[in-house]
Amino acid sequence: ETGVTQTPRHLVMGMTNKKSLKCEQHLGHNAMYWYKQSAKKPLELMFVYNFKEQTENNSVPSRFSPECPNSSHLFLHLHTLQPEDSALYLCASSLRTSYNTGELFFGEGSRLTVL
Amino acid sequence: GENVEQHPSTLSVQEGDSAVIKCTYSDSASNYFPWYKQELGKRPQLIIDIRSNVGEKKDQRIAVTLNKTAKHFSLHITETQPEDSAVYFCAATLWQGGKLIFGQGTELSVKP
């Protein structure tokens, strides 16, 4: 158990649905991340939050909306997704400062299928 | 921005053989290079990392080498075992709070 928990583990949604992915970390980390993992592609960084503030938005479409209410919780709100958005969404956390990238601790991912 | 290329995409070896995975990076400012291992259905986990002030780092059966001039780094696994079968990702970034950019991944299969 790495201390990063993601729910739900599996999600199937239609293109008109609204759903949310949740991530929680109990490691005392200050930075949280969303990565997208598609088959045969590298792990794609989507968003970075540092002390609840968004520090990185990697040109992600607005149908993905992150929310970080505190340093322990991270959400990814999903709205009017496309079938090509089907992927494994990985949350990660790290103890990150401006002087140290820090090791990423990943959750087990949320497998999203968009019909 | 940084771009990381990883080869090969798949690698099959016999148990006991060595395996080598290679990555190249584009940003000469990058100075931190971690490797993550992702077993089937599980989360990626850090297995070894290297910073640009050293050329090689070893931890039991795994080692990483770095050539800053050529901008490439490699993962070496010796005496491979079936439990080494997984997808391995290299990454590059600036140690001082940079954005971690991953390679495409290498699926390693170790046949008993």
Image (cartoon, helix red, strand yellow):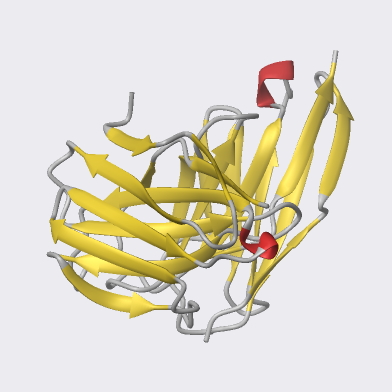
Can residue B91 be spotted in the picture? yes
Quarter-of-image position of residue A77: bottom left
Residue A29, x across and y down, in percent: 17, 49
- The answer to whether residue A62 is above or below residue B75 is below
Residue A83, x across and y down, in percent: 68, 60
Foreground pick, A35 / A99: A35
A51 horizontally vs B62: left or right: left
A32 horizontally vs B84: left or right: left
- Residue depicted at x 88% and y 34%: B12
Residue B93, x across and y down, in percent: 44, 71
- Residue depicted at x 73% and y 57%: B22
- The answer to whether residue B44 is above or below residue B93 is above
Residue A113, x across and y down, in percent: 62, 47
Labels in figure, total: 0
Quarter-of-image position of residue A38: bottom right
Q: Residue furthest front?
A: A16
Can residue A100 be spotted in the picture? no
Quarter-of-image position of residue B88: top right
- The answer to whether residue B73 is above or below residue A113 is below
Point out the image quarter for the C terminus of chain B. top right
A11 horizontally vs A96: left or right: right
